[in-house]
Image (cartoon, grey):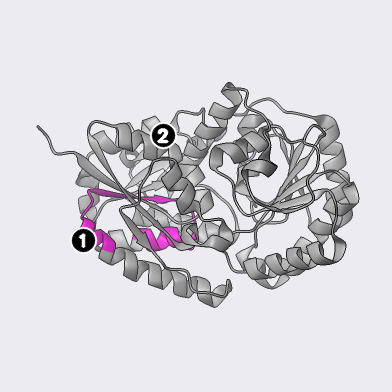
Amino acid sequence: MNKKRTICIVITARASYARIKTVLQAVKDHPELELKLVVGASALLERYGPVVDIIRADGFEPDEVVYMVVEGENLVTSAKSTGLGIVELATIFDNMKPDIVLSIADRYETIATAIAASYLNIPVAHVQGGEITGSIDEKVRHAVTKLSNIHFVSNEKAAERVIRMGESPDTVFVTGCPSVDLAAQVVMENRHGFDVFSRYAGVGHQFSMDQPYLVVMQHPVTTEYEDSLEQVEETLAAIEAVSIPAFWFWPNVDAGSDRISKAIRQFREIRDVPYIYFFKNLAPEDFLCLLNSAACLVGNSSVGIRESSFMGLPVVNIGNRQAGRDRATNVLDVSYERKEIIDTIHSHIKHGRFPTSTLYGDGKAGSRIADLLASTSLKVGKRLTY
């Protein structure tokens, strides 16, 4: 009997878990694979909504946890967190000795994962390479591509970019994005809103979900770090002005997060708007269920580009965080100026839903990736041995 191939998947943030959950399940269920799970960084921290608790509730027990976030949420601490991640993950990988390490997308934790595995001559598989996103994220994504041996990309355009970067076409696979898998399940099952107030703890005034509502997610842009507070203040003013109930989600751990968090807390204390409710985090399926019943998504999250395109949800994308990323017709881009945000929200809601787009996948990425992890030759990994 052949030995199972060991796949180590590293989850470091709430977005990482949503992007890779169907792969986790497919790897866990695959007869030729053994799942090893590492959870770290902001996925362990209470202030971002402890993702590790959701992971465990879904039946995935981490084999290792790694604390690697240096306090401060600024440019220096992001660099230091990356270095700490390399140190800690190198030890974990050396002890675990997986056959493949899988890294996700474009965060600083992702490049720490790829660097640690690469220097140990462990083949790296990368999900969501070849995409253009602007700012530091794009540099990280492309750097991880060059550190990786196997590439699971969302679409043909992404595949072409990876190949143009010098990667062998034999190592590049168009699988679709695993995060779309969950959106496809929600759409197929026609799952809509539920009583989110009773299921999750948040802050703010509850409102009736029978009326149209917004979902707001605005994260810091690392290359615009110093402007984070002013940028989110414009969005807060816009959401107050449109007078449509809104669920607002806490920003991620990137540099500038503390400034956005400060602006939200000050707004909540001073304005006390009765139709905005704030959450840290929801389980991925519950979040997508909430999104599936929303009138519009506002902010700069990649959810607006990926999952929302499959759902056909109107999206008002603010600023430069998703600059250059391929997008479907459901996305309208605006500046940080409040009047433009207000006008675009109104017009986009008036338009209503858009046709489903498979730009980022058809909902079957998880099983495809697991099959490829089981069957792809690991000889490609040996190119790192000199």
Q: Quadrant of the C terminus?
A: bottom left
Identify the image quadrant of residue 6.
Answer: top left
Return the residue at label 2: 366
Q: Residue furthest left?
A: 1
Viewed as shown, does residue 37 lie left or right of 14? left
Q: Nearer the viewer, residue 61 or 236?
A: 61
Q: Residue furthest bottom?
A: 76
Q: Secondary structure at mark 2?
A: helix
Viewed as shown, does residue 47 lie left or right of 210? left
Q: Residue at x 38, y 30 (%)?
A: 367
Task: Count residues near mark 2 (Cα–Cα under 10 Å), then give few for <14, some for 14-19, many for 20+.
Answer: many
Q: Is residue 244 above or below residue 225?
A: above
Which mark identifies residue 268?
Answer: none
Q: Position of residue 215 (x, y in %)?
A: 72, 44
Q: Nearer the viewer, mark 2 or mark 1?
A: 1
Residue 93 in the magenta stretch? The answer is yes
Q: Are marks 2 and 1 in contact (CB under 8 Å)?
A: no
Q: Position of residue 304 (x, y in %)?
A: 65, 43
Disc 1 residue type? Asn
Q: Earlier in the sequence, mark 2 or mark 1?
A: 1
Q: Position of residue 53 (x, y in %)?
A: 47, 51
Viewed as shown, does residue 313 lie left or right of 13? right
Return the residue at label 1: 95
Extent of the magenta region = 92-114
Identify the image quadrant of residue 350.
Answer: top right
